[in-house]
Amino acid sequence: MVELSLASDFPPADEAAWKALVEEALKGAPFAALKSKTYDGIAIEPLYGRAQQASRIEGRTPGLPWAVMQRIDLPDPKPANTQILDDLNNGASGLTLVFQGAIGDYGYALPATGTAISAVLDNVYLDAGVAIDLDLSRGSKDAAGLLATLVKARSLAPQAVHIRFGFNPLGAIAMTGESPKPWPDLAPIFAGLVSDLAAQDFAGPFAVADGRVIHAAGGSEAQELAFALACAVAYLRAMEQGGIKLDDARRFIYFRLAADQDQFLTIAKFRALRKLWARVAEACGLNPRPAFVAAETAWRMMTKRDPHGNIVRGTIAALGAAVGGADAVSVLPFSVALGVPDAFARRIARNTQTILIEEANIHRVADAAAGSGAIEALTDALCATAWTLFQAIEREGGAAEALEAGSIQRAVAKVRAEREGNVARRKETLIGTSDFPDLAEDQVAVLAQARLAALSTSKEALAPMRLSEPFERLRDRSDAHLAKHGTRPKVFLACLGRPADFNARASFAKSQFESGGIEAAQGDGDNLMKRFKDSGAKLACLCSSDKVYASRAADTATALRKAGAKRVYLAGKAGADRAALEQAGIGNFLHQGCDTLQILHSAYDEI
């Protein structure tokens, strides 16, 4: 059989040749235009060479797949048990039990009673390798002891079960903004709960340092890492002061992080956590031991509109967590923002991971990103930034003191505001919501289940958010208009010139208006004013090239205003003719980076 050649058929490429092609493509724009920054201010270059001196980060056991976790949050225990048995029989290897008020409570959760826990886990063979992860809140911390009691009631050896008990008092403080006791009084209680379960021969881990609360509140990757690390160190100290050996205390702690749709940042974040925790162990004089790291795909990236797009986001996030070395991954079902996901959505969530394991074989390469110049640079930069933030928290006295002082909350709020501003300007895009929306999308089925009342929180709480919510509220207004009037609010796209002149900007304007639920009706050619009147629109937007605008925009805008348009927009920047165009009645200029949300809200004032 003749051996085929591929790479050898092409001439060798070097950075100089690549830069020459880039400069040609940029057409005079600066090379710096290809660079970007994360919300932590970390610079991302357009090209990286191979990291020659990189080595593998110790993490998940090489060659072994991660645990495929399925979240259980249905408040009714019996249907929840039906879900569990279906999950375990069809690909899931573990269960995350979500209790009310936990960081992972997105409106639905299990009751923390012995009867409910027993019913939920009916016919689940806890000693058959099924991993159980408890997502606890302050009010549901007793669920850990109730589960331990259930294990004994079934005559199972505590060493034979795989339970991560999930005590997370500092996460609860961050989530609610309140603490029932000062941390010096709370820490011994926490250590006592851990000691009691360890004395019963449960292997643990028992305490979780959960960064999701930072991520869901809009924080950055380094902030999430720093908070998780600060919590873990606080738990180490509490357990050591409670009489637990330091090496055992380290073993009793695990981590949870959010996995986002930014694939490379997610990979780097999970790798960075292991390096940071190894540095803490080194400072404590402990021998290296890989931490157990669990991942859940991010709540803040989930959307209600075009929810099937969440399947893609969840797949990218799961891939990032897996390549980053996560030991367990939970994929949020694509309809979770709408309500309790049905069996189909749960199956997709499971199969997302099954495909990554069974078909893509992602798990077979240990630290697959090692040596990648881009990932190694991001990992190191995240480590450095997160370590600086962690040291700042430590200088305040630790995570509890920093939360009490509000410094963590203020830092997260600053990043959240920046992120929300970028969403409003569509610089941070949400496909199907802020970009390329479908106003005729089909409804997605969810289970009929009343949403639980949210637990009270203080103004210092790190409130969770979804990036798509501002656009979803506008879409809700559109739905209400449709229900009342039989039609959606409309904008008429007055396209001037040839298709080559207006197609690009018409497409841009359509996406911008429909992201807020304002339906775009397009017209071009002769009889433009008649087409506008026939459309029933109260808004109009000019779409064409700058050259055509120079000769026709002002007159067309004036005619549209006379024909009844309450507001006229122009797709493009104003340029030197701004004053004349505004004089002709053009009220807003739509372009990349404009405040889309503000424009859409103003549009509804005219409808």
Image (cartoon, rainbow, N blue to C red):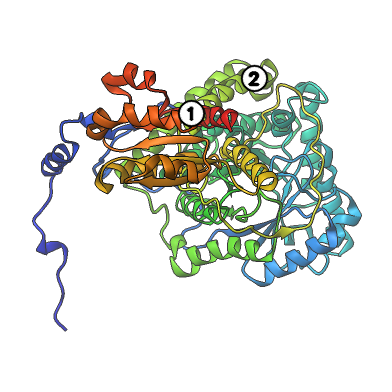
Inter-mark Cα distance, 1 to 2: 49 Å
Horizontal and vertical percent for residue 97? 74, 52
- The mark found on residue 402 in the picture is 2
- Say whether residue 365 is visible: yes
- Would residue 415 be found to the left or right of residue 368 on screen? right
Indicate the secondary structure of the residue bearing disc 1: strand
Quarter of the figure that contains the C terminus:
top right
Nearest to N terminus: mark 1 or mark 2? 2
Residue at figure coordinates x 60%, y 42% from the top left: 475
Indicate the secondary structure of the residue bearing disc 2: helix
Quarter of the figure that contains the N terminus:
bottom left
Residue marked by disc 1: 567
Residue at figure coordinates x 52%, y 25% from the top left: 415
Residue 348 location, quadrant: bottom right
Mark 1 or 2: in front is: 1
Residue at figure coordinates x 41%, y 39% from the top left: 529
- Would residue 419 be found to the left or right of residue 7 on screen? right
Say which of 294 and 537 sits in front.
537
- Would residue 96 be found to the left or right of residue 425 on screen? right
> With respect to residue 258, does 39 lie above or below?
above
* Kind of residue indicated by mark 1: Arg
